[in-house]
Image (cartoon, rainbow, N blue to C red):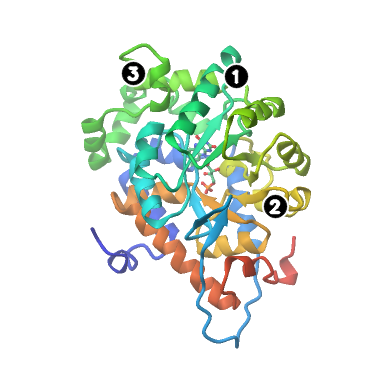
């Protein structure tokens, strides 16, 4: 295992990890990870929103030793960020979810397993017993038969937090994935994709060894011997329809631990979520992947924090690309943050220890920002002054 010190000169920023990732994965996988819905405008705005936030440094306080400890739903984590839920991670590297879950467990930061992941709930829960969260889409067919079974399985597996993603009432339209026929069976047989794969021999060799990934969590709901394509098709058909607040209430009645609603961008929806029993809100536009006119989640944060009025933990994702962005999010009112794509880029670029490296990098960058800001705790970041010229 290479040390942080050996890797840092190669990948001093998440942008370096992204560039290196593109050398490992085929173009159609890069399109799946990095693509947004429509013209990628929402994804671009997410980035822009962070760049606009300036924070006024404070000096002369001497000897600031920042602690990153973050308490969420009564549990202490070592940093104010976690791994966001992401479907079909094994398209990047085999056993991607298992690798990232292990890294999160070692670092004691939240790991959110997606319902559309390429690893099973029970496997990942065993690898990350202290930090395992489970994310669920609304799967309304047959009176939510599968949704309720997944809630039961997440409970038995010991998930600390259940995350309900509400921003996918309809399948996202991502033009690049449609063009690449990613959702349909047999994309490997298209000449353009084959040529793409042949240009990435190490990725191709890994995939040949492990096979095409599918949404493994759904395997037990399909007949024996279902293919990866069958699993993905089943997941897509089930996801159509999303959550209603009434159904969130129904889940609240059976879920014993913290309940979080992800994908909220409107203050009134945050109030609905709390009314339905949510303990936390993740302000998110899904990294710009579901609706191209969605505003940046960072811009929605103040309104939602005000609407929640301390009744729920307000968290944020979409567009964070480093420790400084985590500081910006916390200074804007978030209790913690999640990152998505950077974890996939790190795993693609580095392999086995990619997640561990990114966690160390984010911690290092965040500590550096906190010393500049003269803050020694995560709570103090909430009262950092934002630069006047750029205030939203
Ligand atoms: C490849 C990929 C797959 C994703 N799959 C899911 C998913 O299954 N469920 C979900 O709630 N969010 C999903 N997301 C959204 C992330 O949880 C998160 O909201 C988003 O990635 C944050 O933006 P960022 O990538 O800019 O950090 C996915 C994101 C990516 C990049």
Q: Secondary structure at mark 1?
A: loop
Q: Quadrant of the N terminus?
A: bottom left
Residue 227 in sight here: yes
Calculate the distance from the C-alpha at mark 1 to the C-alpha at mark 3. 23 Å
Q: Nearer the viewer, mark 1 or mark 3?
A: 1
Residue 301: mark: 2
Q: Is residue 240 left or right of residue 343?
A: right
Calculate the distance from the C-alpha at mark 2 to the C-alpha at mark 1. 29 Å
Tell me where residue 307 appears, x and y as whole percent: 78, 48
Residue 140: mark: 1
Residue 23: mark: none
Q: Secondary structure at mark 2?
A: helix
Q: Quadrant of the C terminus?
A: bottom right
Residue 232, by quadrant, is top left
Q: Is residue 19 left or right of residue 162?
A: left
For disc 3, the marked residue is 227
Q: Nearer the viewer, mark 2 or mark 1?
A: 1
């Amino acid at each position: 295992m290479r040390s942080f010190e050996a890797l840092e000169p190669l990948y001093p920023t998440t942008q370096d990890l992204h560039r290196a990732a593109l050398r490992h994965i085929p173009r159609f996988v890069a399109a799946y990870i990095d693509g947004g819905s429509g013209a990628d405008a929402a994804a671009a705005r997410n980035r822009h929103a962070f760049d606009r936030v300036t924070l006024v440094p404070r000096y002369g306080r001497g000897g600031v030793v920042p602690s990153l400890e973050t308490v969420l739903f009564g549990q202490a984590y070592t940093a104010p960020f976690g791994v966001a839920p992401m479907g079909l991670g094994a398209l990047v590297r085999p056993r991607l979810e298992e690798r990232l879950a292990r890294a999160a467990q070692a670092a004691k930061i939240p790991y959110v397993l997606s319902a559309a992941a390429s690893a099973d709930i029970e496997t990942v829960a065993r690898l990350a017993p202290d930090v395992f969260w489970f994310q669920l889409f609304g799967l309304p067919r047959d009176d939510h038969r599968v949704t309720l079974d997944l809630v039961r399985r997440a409970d038995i597996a010991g998930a600390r937090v259940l995350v309900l993603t509400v921003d996918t009432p309809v399948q996202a339209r991502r033009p690049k994935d449609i063009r690449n026929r990613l959702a349909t069976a047999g994309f490997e047989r298209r000449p353009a994709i084959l040529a793409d794969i042949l240009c990435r021999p190490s990725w191709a060799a890994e995939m040949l060894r492990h096979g095409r990934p599918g949404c493994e969590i759904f395997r037990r709901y399909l007949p024996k011997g279902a293919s990866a394509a069958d699993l993905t098709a089943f997941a897509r058909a089930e996801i159509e329809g999303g959550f209603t607040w009434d159904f969130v209430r129904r889940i609240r009645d059976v879920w014993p631990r913290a309940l979080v609603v992800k994908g909220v961008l409107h203050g009134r929806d945050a109030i609905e979520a709390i009314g339905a029993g949510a303990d936390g809100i993740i302000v998110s536009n899904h990294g710009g992947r579901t609706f191209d006119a969605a505003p940046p989640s960072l811009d929605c944060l103040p309104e939602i924090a005000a609407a929640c009025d301390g009744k729920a933990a307000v968290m944020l994702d979409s567009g964070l690309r480093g420790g400084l962005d985590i500081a910006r999010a916390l200074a804007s009112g978030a209790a913690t943050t999640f990152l998505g794509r950077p974890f996939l880029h790190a795993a693609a670029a580095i392999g086995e220890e990619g997640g561990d490296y990114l966690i160390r990098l984010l911690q290092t960058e965040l500590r550096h920002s906190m010393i500049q800001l003269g803050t020694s705790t995560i709570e103090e970041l909430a009262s950092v002054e934002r630069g006047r010229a750029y205030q939203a």
